[in-house]
């Protein structure tokens, strides 16, 4: 096992850190079952899904992304506070962490991914840190996470429209020249930690039979500050910027 200064060095250098095997097979199986049951109950507050016009042809209409489940689901409320997330997140960010949001991506076979972005293009507080728990094994075929190492050293970057045939969200980040995308293979139970400035996202799930489910918690560092308003770097202003 690495000590905390090695973990932090890796996080600061590449912009992310993968904690391997932090959750057991039984724990992730219980989470998968719980969230599939919740999804089967019907719509939940804040669902973000597919293209309604496409009906059953867009799998995200049936498996919309859930957000802020901790507000109405006791298990999510308890899982987001798990010390395997909070202790490592605190070490990596160098401060105590406070809950920002919870999310659950189902990413069923055939689903689109999410255009590459910086979380700070959505959440205008810095620093923040995400803990992304793989509930299934993830690889290129089922739409693993894509990271752009080193992009976190470029500050907040401009946004542009995403390719909606590949992304269920409408914006993506401009990627600084010379930086390369890397896919992160993960096993169910691994946790990917990443900060608000690193460019990341995912491509479609091209399999016919494998979900790529993930439970994601974003935390604020206690010393977090507001990022200044700057329309060209804000996803919420994208329509205005491109209009
Ligand atoms: O899971 C994905 O495909 C993208 C997740 C993401 O962008 C995030 O958690 O900030």
Image (cartoon, rainbow, N blue to C red):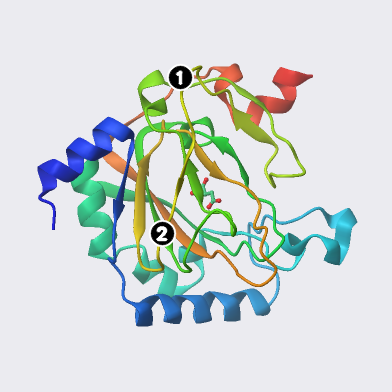
The mark tally for this picture is: 2
Residue picked out by circle 1:
228
Residue 179, given in percent of the width and then of the height, sits at 46, 24
Label 2 sits on residue: 186
The location of residue 215, given as percent across then percent down, is 46, 62
Which of the two discs, 1 and 2, labels the residue nearer the N terminus?
2
Quadrant containing the C terminus is: top right
Q: Whole-Å distance between the Cαs marked 1 and 2?
A: 35 Å
Q: Nearer the viewer, mark 1 or mark 2?
A: 2
Seen at 41% across and 59% down, the residue is 186
Tell me: residue 240, above or below residue 32: above
Quarter of the image where one finds residue 36: bottom right
Residue visible at 36% across and 52% down in the picture = 192
Residue 123 position, x and y percent, is 48, 36
How many residues crowd around disc 2 within 10 Å: few (fewer than 14), some, or many (20 or more)?
many
In front of the other: 177 or 131: 177
Query: On screen, 185 above or below 211?
Result: above
Q: What element carries label 2?
A: loop
Q: Looking at the image, do the residues carrying marks 1 and 2 touch, with CB atoms under 8 Å apart?
A: no
Where does the image place residue 5, in percent across and percent down from the top left? Answer: 11, 41
In the rendered view, does 39 fall on the left or right side of 9? right
Per the image, label 1 sits on a secondary structure element best described as loop
Quadrant (top left, top right, bottom left, bottom right) of the N terminus: bottom left
């Amino acid at each position: 096992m690495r000590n905390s200064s090695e973990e932090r060095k890796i996080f600061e250098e590449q912009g992310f850190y993968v904690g391997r095997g932090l959750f057991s097979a039984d724990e992730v199986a219980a989470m998968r079952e719980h969230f599939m049951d919740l999804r089967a109950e019907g719509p939940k507050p804040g669902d973000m899904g597919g293209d309604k016009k496409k009906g059953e042809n867009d799998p995200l209409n049936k498996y919309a992304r859930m957000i802020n489940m901790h507000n109405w689901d006791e298990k999510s409320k308890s899982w987001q506070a798990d010390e395997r997330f909070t202790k490592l997140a605190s070490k990596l960010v160098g401060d105590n962490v406070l809950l920002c949001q919870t999310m659950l991506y189902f990413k069923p076979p055939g689903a689109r991914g999410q255009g590459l972005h910086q979380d700070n293009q959505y959440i205008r507080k810095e620093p923040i840190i995400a803990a992304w728990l793989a509930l299934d094994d993830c690889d290129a075929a089922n739409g693993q996470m894509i990271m752009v190492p080193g992009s976190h050293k470029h500050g907040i970057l401009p946004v542009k429209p995403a390719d909606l045939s590949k992304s269920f969200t409408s914006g993506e980040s401009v990627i600084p020249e010379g930086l390369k995308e890397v896919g992160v293979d993960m096993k169910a139970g691994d946790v990917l930690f990443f900060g608000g400035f690193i460019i990341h996202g995912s491509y479609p799930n091209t399999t016919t039979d494998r979900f790529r489910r993930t439970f994601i918690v974003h935390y604020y560092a206690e010393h977090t500050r507001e990022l200044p308003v700057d329309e060209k770097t804000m996803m919420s202003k994208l329509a205005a910027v491109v209009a």
